[in-house]
Image (tube, grey):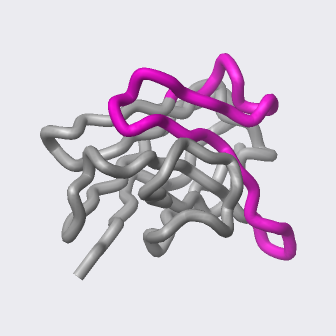
Amino acid sequence: QVQLVESGGGLVQPGGSLRLSCAASGLTFSNYAMGWFRQAPGKEREFVAAITRTGSSTRYVDSVKGRFTISRDNAKNTVYLQMNSLKPEDTAVYYCGANRNTMTTTMNVYDYWGQGTQVTVSS
């Protein structure tokens, strides 16, 4: 019954912005650290951003630092990824993951995943 549902993806021009949302259900949201990963066709899934259970700490891959911001609203069971100054290399399917332990950049220790939302950055 656990579900993570991503939304907010789409087509945007270079330099533009998008805000992704991941709505969780079937779990106690505040007990899970959350993360965003992305995967382009033919590429491995890579870590993008993660946030602790309370939102007190965050972590980002170097390529998005200063451009992306992860946040969460535990009252709404939702984690967000605000993406600014988007570049063509940001094009990928973005996935939301939930981890019942600590904040982590390691993909294969996440307990639950959403289906993903497509982000395309192109002029």
The question of residue 72 being in magenta is answered with: no
The question of residue 67 being in magenta is answered with: yes
Number of numbered labels in the structure image: 0
The residue lying at 25 percent from left, 35 percent from top is: 73
- Residue 21 % position (x, y): 36, 48
User: Residue farthest to the bottom?
Assistant: 1
Q: Please tell me whether residue 10 is drawn above or below residue 66 in the rendered image.
A: below
Please indicate whether residue 4 sits to the left or right of residue 37 in the image. left
Looking at the rendered image, the quarter that the N terminus falls into is bottom left
Q: Please tell me whether residue 34 is drawn above or below residue 95 in the rendered image.
A: above
Decide which of 6, 103 is in the foreground and name it: 103
The residue lying at 80 percent from left, 29 percent from top is: 62
Please indicate whether residue 38 sits to the left or right of residue 17 in the image. right
The residue lying at 34 percent from left, 66 percent from top is: 5
User: Residue farthest to the right?
Assistant: 42
- Residue 96 % position (x, y): 48, 58
Looking at the rendered image, the quarter that the C terminus falls into is top right
Q: What stretch is highlighted in magenta?
A: 40-69
Location of residue 38 by image quarter:
bottom right
